[in-house]
Image: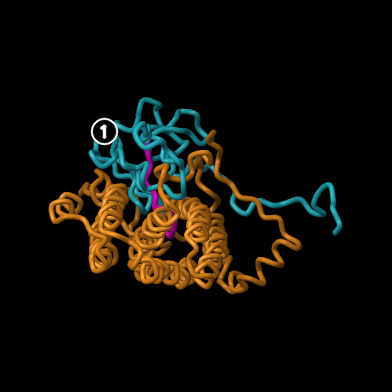
Amino acid sequence: MKVPFELEWMGGAAEHHFRKARPRTEELPWGTVDPSQYDPAAVDRARSSWTEVAINEYRAVASFSEVLRALVDAKAPLDLLGMTSDFLADECAHVELASRMAMELGGAAPRLVDFDRFTGPLRRGLTASQRANELVLRVSCISEAFSGGTATVSYEATSHPLPRAVYGSILRDEAHHRRLGGLYFEWALARIDEAELRRLGQVLLASLRGLTPFWKSRAATSPAAPAWSEADLGALGWLGPAQFAPVAKDVVVRDILDPLATIGIAITADERAELLT
Amino acid sequence: MLYRKAPPGPPRLLLRIVATAGAGALLGFTGCSSDSGSPVDSGSAVGPEGGLLPNVASDASDDSAPVVFSSSGGIMIRPDDDASPPDAEAGLDVSSPDAFDGSGDATDDATAPCHPCGVVVRPDQ
């Protein structure tokens, strides 16, 4: 069942403990965005985008929970488990930051989420190692690399101090989240045979095909000018479609395809061409 | 350990929906409802497995659209051979509740999908 996406905050002991774990949130310049100073249409788009970031960071809590469980099942090194455990609190902090950004801009945009279908498929019958391989690949090597790589460019274009500080805080954490994939495969690669590498190549291809609307959809390729000030939208944290699409493709090549190919997780030249054109 | 039957203070909403009638909200996303003021369900949206990125609505007529299912995060066990086809539901929608004539759906050419930045491109503009 789909439900509107809103989030509760308990306060008291729960907040106190969480603040001890992630103490810097209150240091950001909250209360400094004056939406009346920006094009109302840009403000609406920005708050929609920050709402969706909150949802996707909430999804990241679920994703890293599944990664952690898979690493436990695969008996990955304990310090790697501890590192991954820490990411869960990071992602909760990111949800808070994005939620507060949306609220600064006037409130969350209405979005429905089906929590029974919040997470994606994992084929039945995989071994513990295969589950870990696939989930680390999808979550750390692909999703975190894609969102982190593209967000770096959005961050550079963001002029208001609050969204810049939010970006900076999240990007600092996500650099570690991306590192997980490299560390995991350093440990696991010796246990991965050629057949599994080929399977992971197909997982890579499927995951990247899922992202192609970011550069292939009509919205991403339309030359039509948006109906709001791109400068104002940029100030609040978001690139226009004409700017974002090439960034997304560059990140896929530079931060995902090329690095993974060096450890044998690859797609064919034809698949790469189909993906990127 | 002290157990209470309710928290000493009521939880507050960290993230609260505010449906505005602002100009941006009035732009029609694909498949919006005419039921202004409440979130509605239609179309497909692609989001990352998690991370600092909003969603993009996939083109229903776009060959890339079906893989929307693979881009959502976490685990969902499905059978090997009878996996259901990718669903139009990606778990969340990018639809606006406001000012839509109710005739659109994910294939409606009148409004193109939103961009990762939330942009909705209207070909007539």
Q: Which residue is mark 1?
A: B109
* Residue A243 visible in the snapshot: no
Q: Quadrant of residue A149?
A: bottom left
* Region rendered in magenta: B44-53
Say few, some or many: other residues with alpha carbon within 10 Å of mark 1 (under 14 / 14 to 19 / 20 or more).
some
Most common secondary structure along the magenta stretch: loop
How many numbered callouts? Answer: 1
Task: Tell me which residue sits at (20%, 51%) in the image.
Answer: A275
Looking at the picture, how far across and down is residue A38, in whole percent? 44, 58
Looking at the picture, how far across and down is residue B87, in whole percent? 38, 34
The chain letter of the orange chain reads: A
Quarter of the figure with the C terminus of chain B = top left
In the rendered image of this protein, does residue A207 appear above or below residue A115? below
Q: Quadrant of residue A158?
A: bottom left
Looking at the picture, how far across and down is residue A227, in whole percent? 32, 48
* The hue in which chain B appears in the rendered picture of the protein: cyan
Quarter of the figure with the N terminus of chain B = bottom right
* Left or right: residue A131 compared with residue A106: left
Identify which amino acid the numbered label 1 is placed on. Answer: Asp
